[in-house]
Image (cartoon, rainbow, N blue to C red):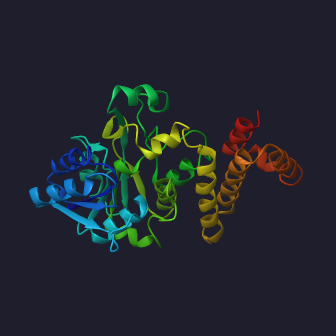
């Protein structure tokens, strides 16, 4: 296997060395592709030092040297990657020694486009743990049980009960399989662009579960992590998820091969977040409209959960 590990780097001077060295421990890692995204700290200099120290570390910036976000940075990393497989790693996270154990076996099957696993949690400080333990705990981020590839996409949409989720840090893709995707990450999504990508990915590609009963990578939690602030409600999560599900809904409406049942489910979830983020009077108007015109959608699992959660 020749794996390219794509690492978007922003404001991570304290963490990126650990991330890179955790990837370089594997013979299968052909290269670590750093994409520095105009960090306000000293991350660019640290990346330069890593590229000078390790021959397998490649450093890139956007052509205009500007800040374009994690999605655009990952896209550039995929474009520059020369390996046969692509994996991802956030600059403040790190791999564990078992990271590619399942991949080495599963990718012997040419029908396997991608493999996902579980990630754990590490708190970089007691302050971070005090602030965010209620969000992440010591839980694994993973799909809860081994799944057939055909069940991954509807499972991630919670169409058949609780399924779980997986993270980019624990995802490895066959590079040639990415040709099935019209585009990769959507740069205009500054948050949740990884979730939107994983949704589409699981529809077009055959994804298989690797190690899901123990962590293969670790999420680093610290005070300045943007997604941590969203998950902990320092940033209002409902408004960011309206943007996410609006994008998913646009894709669903434009994808001709998508079954109508799934298209309607996505629309209902999107509506639930619209209601959750609407001002009080507007919210009641929207609820009345859906009660009168779309009552069957109220029975949809995830839609109903969000409806009840934000109404009462």
**Which residue occupies 64% across, 53% down?**
242
Relative to residue 56, is residue 154 drawn left or right? right
Residue 126 image-quadrant placement:
top left
Residue 33 image-quadrant placement:
bottom left
| Residue closest to the eye, 148 or 271 | 271
| Residue closest to the eye, 106 or 256 | 256
Relative to residue 37, is residue 185 drawn left or right? right
Can residue 164 be seen from the camera position used here? Answer: no
**Which residue occupies 87% across, 55% down?**
293
Quadrant the N terminus occupies? bottom left
Relative to residue 194, is residue 74 drawn left or right? left
x and y percentages locating residue 139 in the rendered image: 42, 31
**Which residue occupies 76% across, 44% down?**
299
Quadrant the C terminus occupies? top right
| Residue closest to the eye, 146 or 186 | 186
- Is 245 located above or below residue 218 in the figure? below
Relative to residue 203, is residue 66 drawn left or right? left
x and y percentages locating residue 9 in the rendered image: 31, 55
Can residue 268 be seen from the camera position used here? Answer: yes
- Is 215 located above or below residue 111 in the figure? above
x and y percentages locating residue 42 in the rendered image: 25, 52
x and y percentages locating residue 279 in the rendered image: 77, 46
């Amino acid at each position: 296997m020749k794996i390219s590990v794509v690492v978007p780097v922003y404001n991570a001077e304290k963490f990126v060395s650990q991330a890179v060295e955790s990837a370089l421990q594997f013979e299968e890692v052909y290269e670590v592709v750093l994409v520095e995204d105009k960090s306000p700290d000293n991350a660019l200099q640290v990346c330069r030092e890593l590229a000078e120290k390790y021959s397998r570390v490649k450093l890139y910036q956007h052509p205009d040297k500007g800040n374009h976000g994690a999605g655009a940075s990952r896209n550039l990393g995929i474009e520059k990657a020369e390996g046969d497989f692509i994996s991802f790693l956030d600059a403040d996270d790190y791999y564990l020694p078992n990271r590619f154990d399942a991949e080495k076996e599963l990718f012997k099957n040419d029908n396997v486009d991608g493999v996902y696993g579980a990630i754990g949690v590490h708190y970089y400080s007691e302050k971070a743990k005090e602030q965010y333990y209620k969000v992440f705990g010591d839980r694994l981020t993973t799909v809860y049980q081994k799944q057939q590839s055909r069940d991954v996409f509807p499972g991630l949409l919670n169409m058949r009960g609780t399924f779980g989720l997986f993270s980019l840090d624990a995802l490895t893709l066959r590079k040639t399989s990415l040709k099935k995707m019209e585009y990769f990450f959507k740069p205009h999504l500054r948050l949740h662009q990884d979730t939107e990508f994983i949704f589409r990915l699981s529809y077009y590609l055959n994804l298989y579960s690797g190690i899901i009963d123990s962590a293969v990578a670790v999420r680093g939690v610290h005070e300045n992590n943007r997604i941590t602030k969203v998950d902990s409600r320092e940033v209002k999560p409902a408004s960011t998820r309206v943007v996410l599900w609006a994008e998913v809904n646009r894709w669903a409406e434009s994808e001709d091969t998508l079954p109508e049942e799934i298209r309607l489910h996505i629309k209902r979830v999107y509506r639930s977040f619209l209601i959750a983020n609407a001002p009080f009077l507007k919210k009641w108007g929207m609820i009345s409209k859906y009660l009168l015109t779309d009552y069957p959608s109220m029975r949809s699992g995830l839609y109903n959960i969000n409806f009840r959660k934000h109404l009462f």
